[in-house]
Image (tube, rainbow, N blue to C red):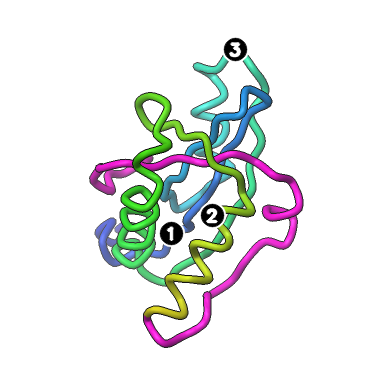
Amino acid sequence: MKPPASLSHASLYLVGSRLGLARIGVAPDPHQRLRELQVGSPVKLELAPVAPYQERQDACAVADELCRQFAPRRAHGSWYRVTAAEVSRALDGLGAALGRGRRTTSAAAGARGLPSRSGPRSCSPGS
């Protein structure tokens, strides 16, 4: 039996495109989520996983805060004009504000300069 979504592990991910748009989301398998998003995209998407979390609710809380911080840069729907480096700095700031460091970071994410997403949202399966 599969554990409830709120109790299972998940990763906070960043999917970017050459259009200068990116999406911040949460999924148990970011690679599967990329495949799902790619189906509806006319351009190639690229995945830069940002941080794995032991509990989905933790990943969702961080994603929601990032979405709030980047809300003014929301392009449409779940897509934002933000780079991976900006998301990485925001994650560092969140860790410092909470008095602890960031969990895990993909060095490749910051180096790629991928854009990212934000705005009011709820953390639903397949975000």
The residue pinned by badge 3 equals 42
14 to the left or right of 122: right
Disc 2 is placed on an element classified as helix
> Within the magenta stretch, is there residue 121?
yes
- Which is nearer the eye, 85 or 11? 85
Q: Identify the residue at horizontal 47%, vertical 55% (top origin).
A: 12
Image location of residue 123, percent across then percent down: 28, 48
* Residue type pointed to by label 2: Val
Q: Which quarter of the picture shows residue 16?
A: top right
Q: Nearer the viewer, residue 52 or 32?
A: 52
Residue 108 highlighted magenta (yes or no) = yes
Quadrant in which the N terminus is drawn: bottom left
Residue at the disc numbered 1? 10
Image quadrant assignment for residue 99: bottom left
52 in relation to 71, above or below: below
Percent across and percent down for residue 56 are 34, 61
Q: Which portion, as a residue range, is magenta?
A: 98-127
Residue denoted by label 2? 87
Furthest residue to the front?
Answer: 72
Label 1 sits on what residue type? Ala
Number of numbered markers: 3
User: Sequence-wise, which precedes: disc 1 or disc 2?
Assistant: 1
Name the quadrant containing residue 54. Answer: bottom left
| Cβ atoms at labels 3 and 2 below 8 Å apart | no
Pointer 3: residues within 10 angstroms few (<14), some, or many (20+)? Answer: few
